[in-house]
């Protein structure tokens, strides 16, 4: 028997359920996924991120929350409360100069989370969820929407959005 066949035969029932679900797989081990789904049995669409400045891990299980863990102990950070979002996190990007995350959720919400100030701000409510979202610099971010041919450019200073159609 080849190693890949041995591994697939040794999966637990939890692993089989995860492997056959409709959710995207996460880029880390199943044991860490279970560790970070503290308050529920939910898993992740977008894997946990490490913040070296605060030595913390931000986990966003598909129960519409952001949870914060000490990177050394893997215990919840008591000084940072779980943040409730309007949808599950589909994509997130970090800008190290501003210690800020931009977060795209299923359902269309876009949030800005400043880790230094522990502040969450809702930037936009869109018709569809952001497929990919990323910072371009400390002021500008870009994203695309699910099933769209447009690229959007956002400005954090005036909260303006500009769209670019890829067919033009």
Image (tube, grey):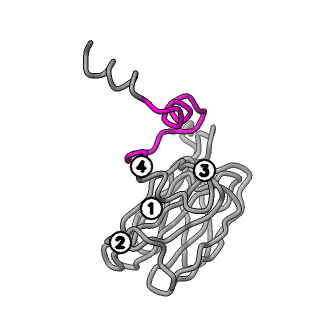
Pointer 3 or 4: first along the chain:
4
Dividing the image into 4 quarters, which one contains the C terminus? top right
Q: CA distance from mark 1 to mark 4?
A: 24 Å
Q: Position of residue 65 (x, y in %)?
A: 62, 64
Q: Say which label, 3 or 1, has the lower sequence index.
A: 3
- Categorize mark 4 by other alpha carbons within 10 Å: few (<14), some (14-19), many (20+): few
* SS for dot 4: helix
For the residues labelled 3 and 4, the Cα–Cα distance comes to: 13 Å
- The answer to the question of whether label 4 and label 2 lie on touching residues, with beta carbons closer than 8 A, is no
Q: Mark 4 or mark 1, which is nearer the start of the sequence?
A: 4
Residue at the location (34% across, 73% down)? Answer: 96
**Dot 2 crowding, Cα within 10 Å, few <14, some 14–19, many 20+:** few
Residue marked by disc 2: 73
Q: Which residue sits at x=36%, y=65%?
A: 50
Q: Which residue is mark 3?
A: 42
Q: Which disc number belongs to residue 93?
A: 1
CA–CA distance in space, label 3 to label 1? 22 Å
20 falls in the magenta region: yes
Q: Which residue is mark 4?
A: 31
Q: Earlier in the sequence, mark 2 or mark 3?
A: 3
Mark 1 or mark 2: whose residue is earlier in sequence: 2
């Amino acid at each position: 028997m080849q190693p890949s066949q041995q591994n697939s035969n040794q999966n637990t029932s939890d692993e089989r359920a995860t492997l056959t679900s409709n959710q995207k797989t996460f880029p880390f081990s199943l044991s860490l996924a279970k560790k970070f789904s503290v308050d529920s049995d939910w898993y992740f669409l977008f894997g946990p991120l490490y913040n070296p400045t605060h030595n913390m891990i931000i986990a966003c299980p598909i129960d519409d929350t952001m949870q914060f863990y000490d990177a050394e102990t893997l215990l919840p950070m008591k000084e940072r409360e779980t943040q409730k979002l309007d949808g599950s996190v589909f994509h997130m990007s970090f800008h190290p100069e501003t210690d800020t995350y931009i977060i795209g959720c299923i359902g269309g919400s876009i949030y800005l989370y400043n880790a230094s100030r522990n502040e969450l701000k809702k930037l936009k409510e869109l018709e569809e969820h952001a497929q990919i979202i990323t910072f371009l610099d400390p002021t500008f971010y870009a994203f695309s929407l699910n099933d769209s041919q447009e690229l959007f450019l956002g400005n954090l200073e005036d909260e303006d959005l500009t769209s670019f159609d890829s067919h033009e």
